[in-house]
Image (cartoon, helix red, strand yellow):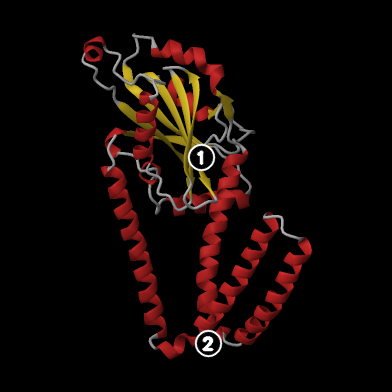
Amino acid sequence: MGSDGSSRRTRTHRRRSFLLLWLGCVGVVLYFREAANMEAAYGLAITLTMLMTTMLMAYYLYIKKYAVWGVILFVVVYLAIEGAFLVANLEKFPHGGWVSLLIGSLIAGVMYIWLAAFLIKMRLTEYVRIDHYLQPFKELSRDISIPKYATHLVFMSNAARQSEIETKVIYSIFQKRPKRADIYWFIHVDTTDDPYTMEYKVNTIAPDDVYKITFRLGFRVEQRINLFFRKVIEDMVKNKEVDITSRYESLNRQNVIGDFRFVVLEKFLSFENDLPLKERLIMNIYFFIKGFTTSEDRWFGLDSSSVKVEKVPLVIRPVENISLKRVS
């Protein structure tokens, strides 16, 4: 489990970010041509930034349980001052101020689409308890009639509860292609509001058979799951919580460590969906934007040489009434 893939992903992500920033700067310069022409856009951008900062600060004070009257007083005072600036800057809107509003609206639109699509997916995502499949896991692991897929099979999971897993993961293991392994690992990443949190929990479903690991990582921490998982394994081996040596007799006698293989389920919008117009539009735009983003295996910092990306259809609302007539 190396970290070269994570380093390459970081460099690629930074290059893309710098390229987008450079293209944006070049576009603005070519449009305005002179610094004097940017005054209107700059002034409106600053005012809008002040307003957003005030609203975010008010929300922070609210969730931190500060006195309601104090939060209201803060909002009234600052919005009155910044509202006066906004009114004064609105006359600059046709002289270039619209550029700031356009860029801000595009970014806000992308954020709205991303959040709305996330909520649509989560609304109908099905989960099951892992311990309900404990016996099938053990039987599959010991079924020598099925070729072994990996010694250690690691699934990335969106299930926040340590005792649960998505039904799509169960389908991938038992039905899509039976994946026999000695030990099954399920990893969930929980992004925290604290920027630099680096914690993990291990839930032992069945010793030396099934484990679930939950990483709690701050939003500023790069998700180098390949590296973090290796550290967790080292700690567990040191504490004698798991035996990671290969279970092939010839390799076990040589104390050879078994191979680790990651599986990432990458969703795509199924043609079987029957969505309302608004939700269909949101999901289509979401998957269009997602096509320009980093793939999920690279986002998690997984080594591409040991990762299997499986395409799974996202069926949010299946078609219910099918008018199909059989003829002789």
The answer to whether residue 188 is visible is yes
Graded by Cα atoms within 10 Å as few (under 14), some (14 to 19) or many (20 or more), the crowding at tag 1 reads few
Residue matched to label 1: 271
Q: Position of residue 17 (x, y in %)?
A: 36, 61
Residue occupying the point 36% across, 32% down:
262
Nearest to N terminus: mark 2 or mark 1: 2
Q: Position of residue 48 (x, y in %)?
A: 58, 74
Q: Position of residue 16 (x, y in %)?
A: 34, 59
The answer to whether residue 281 is visible is no
Q: Secondary structure at mark 2?
A: helix
Q: Nearer the viewer, residue 189 or 13?
A: 189
Residue matched to label 2: 95
Q: Position of residue 317 (x, y in %)?
A: 60, 38
**What is the CA distance from the residue labelled 2 to the residue labelled 1?**
46 Å
Query: Which labelled disc corresponds to residue 120?
Result: none
Residue occupying the point 38% across, 39% down:
225
Q: Nearer the viewer, residue 198 or 25?
A: 198
